[in-house]
Amino acid sequence: MNEADFIAALRRLPLHAGAGGLLDDTASLAGLTITTDTIVEGVHFLSDDPPGDVAWKLVAVNLSDLAAKGAVPEGVLLNYPLNPTPAKAGAQFRDVSGNVPASPAKGAVAGPRPSPGWDEGFVAGLESVLLEFGARLIGGDTVSLPPGAPRVLTLTAIGRDAAAPSRSGAKAGDELWVTGTIGDAGAGLRIARGEDGPADLLAAYRRPQPRLAEGRALAPLVHAMMDVSDGLLLDALRMAAASGLAVAIDLAAVPLSPSYRAFSDDRMAAVTAGDDYQLLFAAPAGFAPPVPATRIGDFAAGVGLTLTDGAEPVPLPSTLGFQH
């Protein structure tokens, strides 16, 4: 099974009403919004990424799901593996398109690394990200891993005062918008693996910024919203499918940062990379967003994703984003 197949199988199980049919990244329970994410060494972060940055990313990716609901962070639960032994050489790291490289690139192997100091660095990074975004630790669990296992880190985030609809609320005729810029984190991963590039792109990969304030401003006004985690194209298609619609995206309209443009001219890599943690939302025609955002497409009756570059049709790439 891939990720989509597995979730489809889970939908046949008895589901809590707050699960929303497993069509979203969050659940609702007693007025709270709940989300959980796991990041794995060699899949979501590199073995030589600083532990403080790993802690930051773990919290930020969860808070990004709360941002997409316009929720205010209430607290987090942490599941943490203490002092695993070094992972086996040869572990593969997905590239930003979801492909596994034929041979490990620099920084891509989950190879031997010292455990002393890693836990301390992680806790320091955890403190900084919790303070930055006003979240608090509630509790969690610690475990041991078998020899050679990569680190597996799980966080559950709980939010309150959510106001946004699910990703399934887009309507025919709605416009598709995105906050910020796309592709910076994908470029940052390439820099983390050894390419030369600017520090702000590396920071976009290692320390993403959940768009909490933007989410709260947009939540009461939009028809559907989600964060961009697995790639702009894939996540836009997920919103369209959940809403029973087709979506068209103009690649020429997708916002790229000056740093990305200086680093790469590959717009398709940007829209399939993932790890952006910007907000993707559907809003009625003529919408004036209260936060900086860019209109990149439209929803219509039908199914699937259509790409253009201005007025020119563009064939879909073989990979729209990352799926487990």
Image (spheres, rainbow, N blue to C red):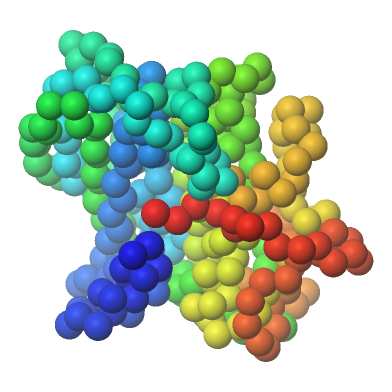
Residue extending farthest right: 311
Q: Viewer-proximal residue, 232 or 72?
A: 232
For residue 257, above or below residue 177: above
Q: Residue at x 63, y 37 (%)?
A: 184
Where does the image place residue 292, in percent across and percent down from the top left? 69, 51
Q: Residue at x 47, y 60 (%)?
A: 68
| 238 lies left or right of 13 | right
Residue extending farthest front: 102
Query: For residue 3, which quarter of the picture?
Result: bottom left
Total numbered labels placed on residues in the image: 0
For residue 250, above or below residue 79: below
Q: Residue at x 51, y 34 (%)?
A: 102
Q: Residue at x 40, y 68 (%)?
A: 4
Query: For residue 51, which quarter of the picture?
Result: top left
| 228 lies left or right of 145 | right
> In which quadrant will I find the N terminus?
bottom left
| 277 lies left or right of 293 | left
Residue extending farthest bottom: 301
Can residue 204 be seen? Answer: no
Q: Viewer-proximal residue, 210 or 247?
A: 247
Q: Viewer-proximal residue, 314 or 22?
A: 314
Can residue 297 be seen? Answer: yes
For residue 302, above or below residue 129: below
Where does the image place residue 315, in percent across and percent down from the top left? 76, 63
Where does the image place residue 70, in percent across and percent down from the top left? 45, 61
Where does the image place residue 53, in percent across and percent down from the top left? 39, 26
> In which quadrant will I find the C terminus?
bottom left
